[in-house]
Amino acid sequence: KAGVTQTPRYLIKTRGQQVTLSCSPISGHRSVSWYQQTPGQGLQFLFEYFSETQRNKGNFPGRFSGRQFSNSRSEMNVSTLELGDSALYLCASSFYGDRGETYEQYFGPGTRLTVT
Amino acid sequence: QQPVQSPQAVILREGEDAVINCSSSKALYSVHWYRQKHGEAPVFLMILLKGGEQKGHDKISASFNEKKQQSSLYLTASQLSYSGTYFCGTESFNNAGNMLTFGGGTRLMVKP
């Protein structure tokens, strides 16, 4: 089974620009979560999508947004980039059942975003 | 509020044991453990659920004290391959769906 894939792997943007990152989950996984990882703040939850609906959102400004498509692929968008947005953005997919059971998350390799 | 992990870092010799702790101020539904090697994505190790169920590796053990909202990961007879940063991720009852709040990580280095 193919793992979680993320594109692009590396990205360099300028302050004020916007960026879109893509995530393809493991086949059959309907839950996709996004995390921001920085040396200072660790792994921070951005949001989670299930069946095209955002179910949970972390404590990030509205510049961070996402969506999920009918094939479970997900994108996240960051508008008006700031220097502090430089980070590794990780996507994780999970087989989340409708009965509220908890399952392990499988992480993609991440997109390294550098804002200059 | 993110869970607190301790210690922040530990250095071991091959064959030694280590315990990594994760403590939360919230009532927890589950605790997840992941290991991340430098430059790689976090890899799932174990899930501990309220009620005692566990899912994960055979060679790694963990405990979950629901009353204290604490979990511990036990690494026995450590190998060089155990090196990496260990994260606990907690799932609370008041979240709809799959939302993990991760601790700050414990950096483990195993030396020959």
Image (tube, grey):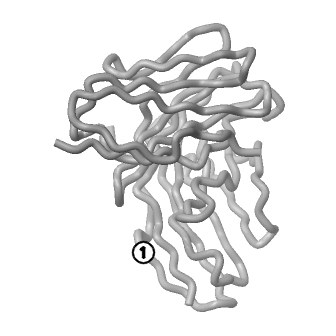
Q: Label 1 sits on what residue type? A: Tyr
Task: Mark 1: give few (<14), some (14-19) or many (20+) Cα within 10 Å.
Answer: few
Q: Position of residue A68 (x, y in %)?
A: 64, 53
Q: Residue at x 43, y 70 (%)?
A: A8
Above/below status of B53 relative to B82: above
Is B74 left or right of A102, judged from the image as shown? left
Using the image as rendered, state which of residue A110 and residue A96 is in the foreground. A110
Residue B85 at least partly seen: yes
Above/below status of B44 relative to A81: above
What is the chain letter for disc 1? Answer: A
Question: Which residue position is annotated with label 1?
Answer: A10
Q: Quadrant of residue B95?
A: top right
SS class, disc 1: strand
Q: Residue at x 62, y 44 (%)?
A: B102
Q: Count every numbered label the image shows and give the total.
A: 1
Is B15 left or right of A48, judged from the image as shown? left
Q: Position of residue A49 (x, y in %)?
A: 68, 46
Above/below status of A78 relative to A67: below
In which quadrant of the rendered image does the N terminus of chain A lie? top left
Q: Residue at x 53, y 25 (%)?
A: B72
Using the image as rendered, state which of residue B73 and residue A6 is in the foreground. B73
